[in-house]
Amino acid sequence: MAVAVFKEMSYRLPSSEEVVVAIYKVLREHGTVDTQRRLREEVLRELRAWDDGYTVSEERVRMLAARANFARVDVHSREGGKKARACPVCGGDLRRVKNRSLWGDEVTVGYTCETCSYRGGMRQRVPTRYVFHLDERRR
């Protein structure tokens, strides 16, 4: 009878500051990263150079990059079926964009995120691709 021996896999989560520093280094090196998955892979490579046990999710890297003052995130999206509730990029609050109709009524024409640069229409836009850019002017 064969007995399987499993090595205990342990991992640690880096602090938000460490992830932001890694994002900055990656964007500084590449300038533009064309997918969320590739950004996570490059950030993870940078983090593991510091500590082999570090791991980080794509969503966490995306949210921290969207909130960083040195990064710009372009969101390619399609229209979904639900009303917009929270920002699909960073999870922040959405603010209504209003306009006046011909009759003087105030009408909501879309939503914009108060934290990152996401803008959407009346229906929630479902992100299909994220492109990350180093934007030194935002500092």
Image (tube, helix red, strand yellow):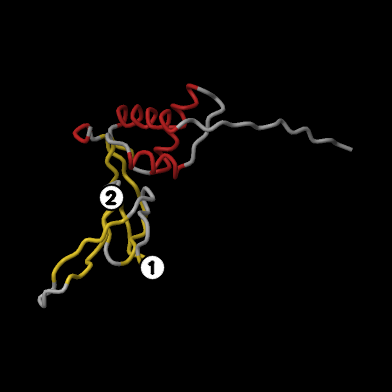
Q: Inspect the image, locate mark 2, and give the three-letter code of the amino acid beneath it.
A: Glu
The residue lying toward the viewer, choosing from 28 and 116, is: 116
x then y, percent, for residue 29: 31, 27
Residue corresponding to mark 2? 114
| Rendered image quadrant of residue 108 | bottom left
* Residue at (34, 53) in percent of width and height: 93
Taking the image as shown, residue 116 lies to the left or right of residue 19, namely: left
Residue corresponding to mark 1? 82
| Rendered image quadrant of residue 38 | top left
* Residue at (35, 39) in percent of width and height: 65
> Considering the numbered disc 2 on the image, is that residue within a helix, a strand or a loop?
loop
Cα separation between marks 1 and 2: 20 Å
Q: Nearer the viewer, mark 1 or mark 2?
A: 2
As drawn, the label of residue 60 is: none
**Residue extending farthest bottom:** 103
**Residue extending farthest top:** 50
The residue lying toward the viewer, choosing from 113 and 105, is: 105
Q: Quadrant of the N terminus?
A: top right
Q: Inspect the image, locate mark 1, and give the three-letter code of the amino acid beneath it.
A: Lys
| Above/below status of 99 relative to 73 | below
x then y, percent, for residue 114: 28, 50
